[in-house]
Structures are given as C-alpha cells and as structure tokens.
Amino acid sequence: MLVAPSILSADFGRLAQEVEAICEAGCDLVHVDVMDGHFVPNMTIGPVVVEAVARAATKPLDIHLMVQNNPFFVDLFAPLKPGFISFHIEEEKHPHRLIQKIRSYGIRPAIVLNPHTRPECVEFLLEDLDMVLLMSVNPGFGGQTFIPGVLEKARRLKEMIEKRNPKCLIEVDGGVNDRNIHELKAAGVDVAVAGSYVFKHESYRRAIESLKV
Ligand code: DX5
Ligand code: ZN
C-alpha cells in the first residue's frame, strides 16, 4: 500500500515543517485538498500555499481538486509539477479532454468518484487514467467516518481495471486508519489517503508504517 497523508489535518501554522515531517516519516505522496467553497461547502488553499508545500515536500504532490471549473485549476497548479492531479467526475462535462490536458503537462491524471457515484462511469476512461480515487466520505472535511460501501466499489473497479488498464491505481480517501486498511488492501486498493489518522498520531512514522500493508 502506498500512503498519502492529507495535509488538511496538519498544523497550518507550521505547514512546511509538517510536510517535511511526513516526507521524512516515509510517506509516498503528499495529498493536497483544494476546495473552492462551491463544489464543496469548505475552502482550503490556493497556488501560493500549495507552492510552499511543493517547496517543503521531498515526495510528489497528489493534488485533489474539489472545485468548479477544473481546467482553470489544472492550469494554475501545473507549474508546481505535482505527481498527480485528480478531479471529480461529478463536476466535469468533458473528462477525456481534461485528462489529455493534465497529461500534456507531464502530470499523471486521476478521476475522483463521490460515495454515490457508480464505478462504471469511468469504465471507458480507464485506458487513459493513471489512478481512480474513491471517496469513502463526503468530500469537504477531514475527520469523518469511513463509508464501508467503498469496499464493494473498489472490488468492482478492480475487475474493470484488470480488463482495461492493469497499471491504473485505486486510491481511497476518507476515514482511513489502521482498522480498515487490511479490508481496503483485500479489495484491491493501492493508495491510502489518511489525514486525521496520521496527523493525530503521536508518531507520524508509526502511523504511516501501520498503513503500509
Ligand atoms: C476530504 C478530503 C480528505 C480528508 C481526509 O474531502 O478529500 O483528503 O483530508 O481526512 P481523513 O483521513 O481525516 O478522513
Ligand atoms: Zn482528498
């Protein structure tokens, strides 16, 4: 399992040190939640702060867009050269075009599915994707309770991925901790996002290690 701590639960007064700490503690990606107050009822950070995160990080950024007007935000964040940019399928009329735009910047494209969204909606995009992110909470806030229905969704998605693009990763975001990580692994999940579990733990290193199953 690859581990992507979500900095949403970090201490923003010491953001650079927090990012350095999770990278030193062995995370694989730094998950950055960008919210615009329209697609979700919360606002987080824009390019100035994400640039500071990119400077502090020694691991690739995994930018999770929760916004309206995805292409605008892709252009805004592309100069920071994140590893991944993911966008919500619920907010995009032309996902295939946006995937091409992300890839044209040399960034790996990913699509996010809200808890209610059927995995079949990305079936004919899988060949062009590097990752599908399944939300296991309603997007907008850290510290919510894991929705177990995501396990069946991951299993169904995994079957489609094996047929169409076995290299495509499955990521899960929301309420992930050391109690559900084994079930997630068994369901075919490759990347675990964890915010409050990592940042509330007394040792970032032990928290990250406990998710590397
Ligand atoms: C929620 C965000 C998550 C969030 C996860 O909209 O996408 O990345 O930070 O936080 P936890 O792990 O606390 O559920
Ligand atoms: Zn996220």
Image (tube, grey):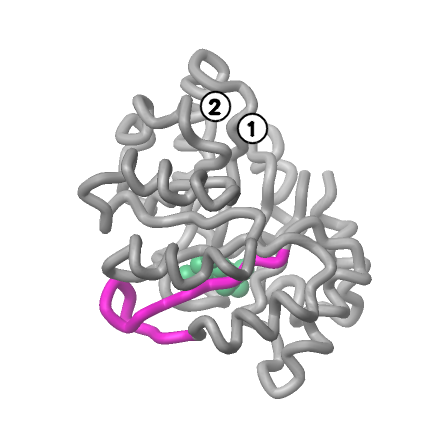
Q: Earlier in the sequence, mark 2 or mark 1?
A: 2
Q: Residue furthest top?
A: 163
**Picture quarter with the N terminus:** top right
Q: Position of residue 207 (x, y in %)?
A: 74, 58
Q: Position of residue 16 (x, y in %)?
A: 68, 77
Q: Residue at x 52, y 76 (%)?
A: 49
Tag 1: amino acid: Gly
Q: Residue at x 49, y 36 (%)?
A: 131
Magenta region includes residue 72: no
For the residue labelled by badge 1, is the local secondary structure a helix, a strand or a loop? Answer: loop
Instruction: Check if mark 2's residue and mark 1's residue have beta carbons within 8 Å.
Output: yes
The residue singled out by tag 2 in the image is 158
Comparing 182 with 101, the one in front is: 101
Give the answer, above or below, for where 51 lies relative to 107: below
Comparing 9 with 34, the one in front is: 34
Magenta stretch, residue numbers? 30-44
